[in-house]
Every structure is written in C-alpha cells, then in structure tokens.
Image (spheres, rainbow, N blue to C red):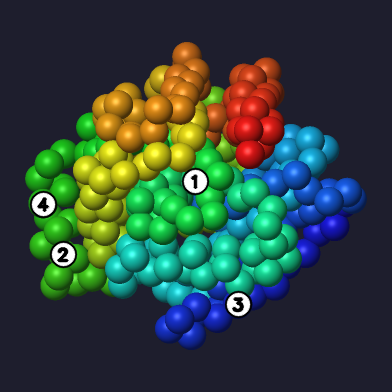
Amino acid sequence: MKAQNATFRAKDGTSIYWAGWTPEQAPKAVVQIIHGYAEHIGRYGNVVEQLLPAGYAVFGTDHRGHGKSEGKRGHVGSFQEFIDDEIQFRREVIDAQFPGCPCFMLGHSMGSIIAMNLVEQSPAGIRGLVLSGTGSRPGEEIPKIIIGITKILSRILPSVHVKSPLPPEFISRDTEVVKAYVDDPLVYNVITPRLAHEMNRYVVIGAQNAFKIRMPVLIQLGSTDTAFSGQYELYQKIGATDKTYKNYEGLRHEVYNELPADRAVALADLSQWLDAHCAEG
C-alpha cells in the first residue's frame, strides 16, 4: 500500500488538504470519498481497509473549514465552493495520477449532497455514484421555524457559530465509534447559519435535479438515520435505470462505522456493487 497526503490551492487560494491510499498493484478504479459535515477524510479507515485489498485506490479531501484544510470551522460562503473544490481535486490530483482509470464517487451525509450536485453539474469521467446517509430534504426533526430563522441569519449573521443540534450518538450504535468521534480534535460541533442554510438549500436542489443523474447509483442508509428525510423519494427521482437502494434495519447515520457485524454487511455491499460496475466498463 502507498499512502500519501498533500494540499492544493482552491480557486480562491484556500489550502485544501487531501489524502490517498493506493494498492501495490495498479488500481482497477479510484473511489473519491466526499466526507460529511464537521468531520474529515481520516474517519474513513473502514472503507479504505475494505476497498484497498479489493484493488481500489481511495482518495479524498478535507473540505474547506474542516479537518486539516484552511477556512473557518463549520462555515462556507457558498455550497458551490465545496463542489468546485471536489471537481478541481479530481482533475488536478486523481486524474493526473490515474489517467484513464475508472473513477467512482462516494458521498456521505453533507458529502452526499455535494456529490449529488456535482454529478448533476459535471458527470464526465465518473463511472458511478454512491450516496450514504443521504436524502431529498432536511431532517424531519428540524422544525420549519428553525429552517426559516437559519435562512434569515444566513443573510444578516452568516458566519456566527452556533452549536450543532445533533448529538454525537446519532452517528452509530457503536459506543467506541461515538467516543472516538467526540475525542477527535478534528471533529467539531458548531455550524454557521450560512452553511446550515446552504446545506438545506442544496439538498433540495440536488433532489430536484436528480433526474439528470444517469450513471449507476447505490444508496446506503440506516433505517433510524434522521439527518435527512425523503430518502426513498430521492431514489425514485434519480434518472438512472441502474440504481440500488439499501436500507439497513436499525442502523444509524454512518453505516460504515456501525457495530462490527452490521458495518461488515454495508461494506461488503459497497465493494460488491463497485466490483459489478467496474467490470461493466
């Protein structure tokens, strides 16, 4: 295995950190992971350990305002900045290292919203799309009045920090995973009104334009995940004829970080789906 990390400069000069893991042999495909809100690419060890022995290279960034990248924590000027950063990363890092190699995109949570909008805007060169912990609307537990207030604050106090409304236990039933999440110095529990509003806005935009997605799609989610709502509605809206919906009974938000036996099922489903669609190319 070859592990690497570095940074690149986004269009506005922000330094974006990235990491990658490559198998000893030439990879049969590259999986670009797009992580979720308040976390970082280093939390995807279970995915790397599953896919690397299967012959996949795995690469991903820390979003601006996240992890080891520059930017105010939990903030973004526009959600499009996340999308543009990922397009630039694939072009300048992944395509440069693996020209002609199939590329799959895997987006989790907020990352699924980034990935969904990205493939709707710029699908060229992406073999397939995996969405984890996703949906078509904000979570039903978020009152509409809070969404309305967030929209107003996004205009008048866009970058003020407020505490995240989600408790850490929402990610997994595995107490060790939750403890590591809480203790991780690169994970935080604040968000700004601008990022919250932009996320709420782009989950709806992504769902409205899901008919544009024609590449193969795999959706994986836990049945008790409350981060977003309208999960099956999103599946129905996706324009691809080759689409798969996996709803794991009892699992929470991070299906790849759930209890060991449950995560093994979700990770096996992921690698088997990738294998099937890698071979199709």
Residue 235, located in which quarter of the rendered image? top left
**Precedes in sequence: disc 1 or disc 4:** 1
* Residue under the image location 56 percent in, 44 percent down: 127
How far apart in space, not on screen, are marks 3 and 1 (Cα)? 20 Å
> Is label 3 in a helix, a strand or a loop?
strand
**Precedes in sequence: disc 3 or disc 1:** 3
Residue corresponding to mark 3: 8
Foreground mark, 2 or 1, reads 1
Q: Residues within 10 Å of mark 4 (few under 14, many from 20)?
A: few
**Precedes in sequence: disc 2 or disc 3:** 3
Residue corresponding to mark 4: 148
How far apart in space, not on screen, are marks 2 and 1 (Cα)? 27 Å
Would residue 278 be visible to someone looking at this image?
A: yes
Q: Position of residue 43 (x, y in %)?
A: 63, 48
The kind of residue tagged 3 is: Phe
In the rendered image, the vertical position of residue 163 relative to residue 157, given as above or below:
above
Whether tag 3 and tag 1 are in contact, CB under 8 A, the answer is: no
Whether tag 2 and tag 1 are in contact, CB under 8 A, the answer is: no
Q: Residues within 10 Å of mark 1 (few under 14, many from 20)?
A: many
Q: Position of residue 264 (x, y in %)?
A: 68, 23
Residue 55, located in which quarter of the rendered image? top right
Residue 225, located in which quarter of the rendered image? top left
In the rendered image, the vertical position of residue 9 relative to residue 88, given as above or below:
below
The kind of residue tagged 2 is: Leu
How far apart in space, not on screen, are marks 3 and 4 (Cα)? 36 Å
Residue 113 is left or right of residue 8, and the answer is left
Residue corresponding to mark 2: 153
Would residue 203 be visible to someone looking at this image?
A: no
* Nearer to me, 190 or 61: 61
> Is label 1 in a helix, a strand or a loop?
strand
